[in-house]
Amino acid sequence: MTTVSCSPSLADIRALQADNLDRLRDSLQQINIRDVVPLLVARNVLRSYEMGALYAKGSDEQVDALIDLLKTKNHWMGPLTDALIRNGKAPIAKILIELQNGK
């Protein structure tokens, strides 16, 4: 008898990714949002009006607003990792990948 493994549901994936973002909150405070967000817009993760809304926030609130916004999106993991690497934040990208892989 064989068993069929099922993939995690979208809700489970989103919950895991939201937890990973919360774990990265302190590390993401080190980045400049204006370096990362345009790449996320170019990769169709965020819309330009969302970028404007993020920029309108105070500098202390921008990372929290970005995290809250990403929690509502699908398929942001790769583009965010790419944006971090392109902006010299590879150690943060490595932590994000390790969290996603469950290490």
Image (cartoon, helix red, strand yellow):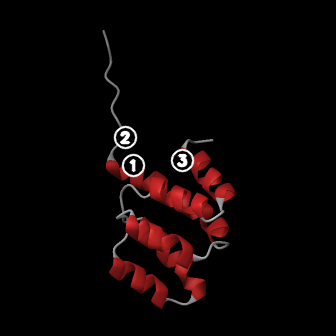
**Residue 1, how many percent across, how many down?**
30, 9
Q: CA distance from mark 1 to mark 3?
A: 13 Å
Residue receiving disc 3: 100
90 sits to left or right of 55 = right
| Residue drawn at point x = 55 percent, y = 76 percent | 33
Q: CA distance from mark 2 to mark 3?
A: 14 Å
In front: label 1 or label 3: 3
Residue receiving disc 1: 12
Count of numbered labels shown in the rendering? 3
The image quadrant of residue 74 is bottom left
Residue receiving disc 2: 8
The image's mark for residue 61 is: none
Which one is earlier in the sequence, the residue at label 2 or at label 3? Answer: 2
Furthest-top residue in this view: 1
**Given the image, on which type of amino acid does mark 2 rest?**
Pro
Q: Which secondary structure, mark 3?
A: helix
**Residue 14, how many percent across, how many down?**
40, 55
Cβ atoms at labels 2 and 1 below 8 Å apart: yes
Cβ atoms at labels 2 and 3 below 8 Å apart: no
> Looking at the image, which is closer to me, 9 or 56?
56
**Residue 31, how many percent across, how many down?**
63, 72
**Given the image, on which type of amino acid does mark 3 rest?**
Gln
| Residue drawn at point x = 42 percent, y = 71 percent | 69
**Residue 55, how many percent across, how many down?**
48, 86
